[in-house]
Amino acid sequence: GGLGAAFWSLEESNLLKNNAITVSDQTTFAAQIGGGVDYYFTPNLAVFGEMSYLAVSIDTSISAPGVSGKLQGDTNSLNFGVGLKAKF
């Protein structure tokens, strides 16, 4: 378990700057929840499985000479992992 925050920033390339294209990113919402299970075969060897869900909301403005627009939406992902753990 845990608590966290997400911050992201778009860096504009010289190609965008040279053509007067600007991208402005906003502070956005992100949340993640997850959990996992370990099963120990021996005191030093285990298999594990984990799953997490990530939700991100996007709100970005893009402008060029004579044109402007917004990129808005949600990105969600469900992630799975399995593996082997060894304690030394």
Image (cartoon, rainbow, N blue to C red):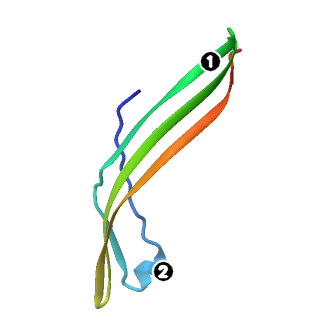
Rendered residue at 41%/27% (across/down): 1
Q: Residue at x 47, y 38 (%)?
A: 52
Looking at the rendered structure, which numbered label has been put on residue 17?
A: none
Left or right side of 41 for 50: left
Residue at the top extreme of this rendering? 43
What residue is pinned by disc 2?
15
Residue 39's disc is 1
Q: Position of residue 23 (x, y in %)?
A: 35, 72
In the image, residue 5 lies at what x, y percent? 34, 41
Mark toward the viewer: 2 or 1: 1
Crowd class of label 1 (few under 14; some 14 to 19; many from 20; radius 10 Å): few
N-terminal-most mark, 2 or 1: 2
Structural crowding at the residue carrying mark 2, measured as other residues with C-alpha within 10 Å and reported as few (<14), some (14–19) or many (≥20): few
Q: Secondary structure at mark 2?
A: helix
Identified at 65% across, 14% down, the residue is 40
Q: Secondary structure at mark 1?
A: strand
Quarter occupied by the C terminus:
top right
Q: Choose between 44 and 39: the one closer to the eye.
A: 39
Residue 18 x %, y %: 43, 84
Question: On screen, 39 above or below 70?
Answer: above
Question: Which kind of residue does numbered mark 1 sit on?
Answer: Tyr
